[in-house]
Amino acid sequence: MFQESIIIKSIYNEYCSLVTDLILTIQKNEFGLPITLNQLSDLQDVETYYHLGGGNFWGAFTGGNLVGTIGLINCGHHIGCVRKMFVKKEYRGKELGIAQQLLNTLMLYCSEKDITDIYLGTTHQLKAAHRFYERNGFTPVGIKDLPTYFPRMMTNNVFYQFHLNE
């Protein structure tokens, strides 16, 4: 199962149902988060929500299967917002490095698009995600310190910031 190479590529609306299935399964079944399909309206049209404004949405594929995602909303003002970073449980970890590849892809895109500050929101339940972001140089930030135009999700209660060095 893990012999296949990992391919990270931009994905568009033809993958919306696969993305939604992956993320809902992880949020609801694995972490017990009270999330519904209606709360994932951004995933019904990734082209409009992510790509159109100058952001992007990527998928990690192995053996033709979607195993991870990450999205970037371009908020303007040289600010980006990370969204929907998820990797299937059996594909997590440093050995495969899928989360790291996804984040590296997003960071490279940000540097190419002159996005210098990156914010993200997550929940207190996702402790491994907190450690991952902190290992990658993200620092916790209070809700009062978020830009006013940060697209906050109601389930998020832990926030991070990263400044890309020039």
Image (spheres, rainbow, N blue to C red):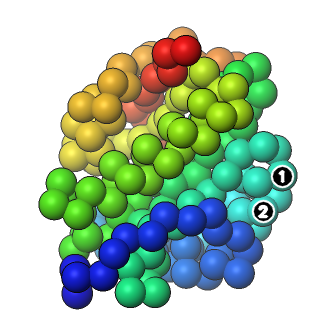
Q: Residue at x 49, y 15 (%)?
A: 165
- In percent of width and height, residue 58 lies at 57, 60
Percent x, y of residue 101: 38, 53
37 lies above or below 33: below
Callout 1 crowding tier (Cα within 10 Å): few <14, some 14–19, many ≥20: few
In the depicted view, which residue is nearer to us: 10 or 145?
10
Amino acid type, residue under disc 1 in the picture: Leu
Depth order, front residue of 17/114: 114
Three-letter code for the amino acid on which mark 2 is drawn: Glu
119 in relation to 93, above or below:
above
Q: Which residue is mark 2?
A: 47
Query: Which sits in the foreground, 34 or 161?
Result: 161
The percent coordinates of residue 32 (x first, y second) are: 32, 64
Helix, strand or loop under label 1: loop
Element type at marker 2?
helix
Q: Which residue corresponds to mark 1?
A: 52
Above or below, comparing residue 53 to residue 163 in the picture? below
Q: Tag 1 or tag 2, which sits nearer the N-term? A: 2
Left-right relation of 20 to 34: right
Quote the CA–CA distance across marks 2 and 1. Answer: 6 Å
The N terminus appears in which quarter of the rendering?
bottom left
Q: Position of residue 136 (x, y in %)?
A: 31, 32
Residue located 26% across and 40% down the image:
132
Res 37 seen here: yes
Count all numbered tags in the image, as a single digit. 2
Mark 2 closeness class: few <14, some 14–19, many ≥20 residues within 10 Å: some
Residue at image coords 46%, 87%: 64
**Is the residue 115 above or below the residue 97 in the image?**
above
Is residue 32 visible to the viewer in this orientation of the structure?
Answer: no
Q: Are marks 2 and 1 in contact (CB under 8 Å)?
A: yes
- Residue farthest left in this picture: 95
The residue depicted at 38 percent of the width and 87 percent of the height is: 63
